[in-house]
Image: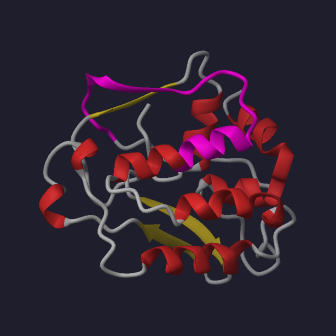
Amino acid sequence: MFLPCIGSIGYWGSLVTESKPVITTLHTFQKQSSLSQCEIVTANGRLKISVPTIKQTRKGAYSEVEIDYTDKWQIEWWRGIENAYKKSPFFLYYDYKLKPKIFANEKYLLDYNVAIVSTLWDILKMEMPLEINKGTAVYFKEMEACSTPAYPQVFDSKMPFCENVCILDALFNLGPETLDYLLSINK
């Protein structure tokens, strides 16, 4: 499996069902992919948020892609997440764990993604360790979108269910039931 920026519900459903979850990071970077982007659900529908990267570092290894802090993108990210999920049932239970990771000033995109995914792994209370493999070279291929069962979302009275968005949506809406939900996806 690859290491995305936060990761979709489908990605996490696959990851948590692995008997020995291993994330491979030795591959080339693909811009406009899940390596630097994810989607949240807002009052206006899906919103893609992305980590800006320094252009000169994008052509090459994922591990060498540097984050561009020229703009205050982390403030916009957090504002978007907060506006989308502050009325969700479990936002207050997890926001204080995620906010410092989102505002971390990692030099490399890979390190930034490792910090966020590791925090989410801990929040989900996964018993098995998550292994980050930085030594095996692989070809990056975007994970195909999958169908995810409906659950209550913050704006479900205004719009139809938005499936396979980032894991934050399930986490803030389902709380401790998120892991059971993820495990049920691949049954």
* Left or right for 32, reference 6: left
76, 149: nearer the viewer:
76
In depth, the one of 28 and 96 nearer the eye is 96
Say if 179 sits above or below 87 in the image: above
Res 166 seen here: yes
Q: Split into 4 quadrants, where in the image is the C terminus?
A: top right
Residue 58 image position (x, y, % from top left): 18, 56
Identify the magenta region. 116-141
- Total labels: the figure holds 0
Does residue 8 lie above or below 185 as drawn?
below
Let me know if residue 137 is in the magenta part. Answer: yes
Estimate the x, y position of residue 163 in percent, counting from the top left: 64, 57
Residue positioned 76% across, 38% down in the render: 179
* Residue closest to the eye, 56 or 42: 56
Q: Quadrant of the N terminus?
A: top left
Q: Quarter of the image holding residue 31?
A: bottom left
Residue visible at 33% across and 73% down in the picture: 69
Where residue 111 appears, as percent x and y from the top left, is 40, 46
Q: Nearer the viewer, residue 59 or 9?
A: 59
Q: Is residue 122 magenta?
A: yes
Q: Quadrant of residue 142?
A: top left
Could you tell me residue 162's position as x and y percent? 65, 64
Q: Residue at x 60, y 80 (%)?
A: 79
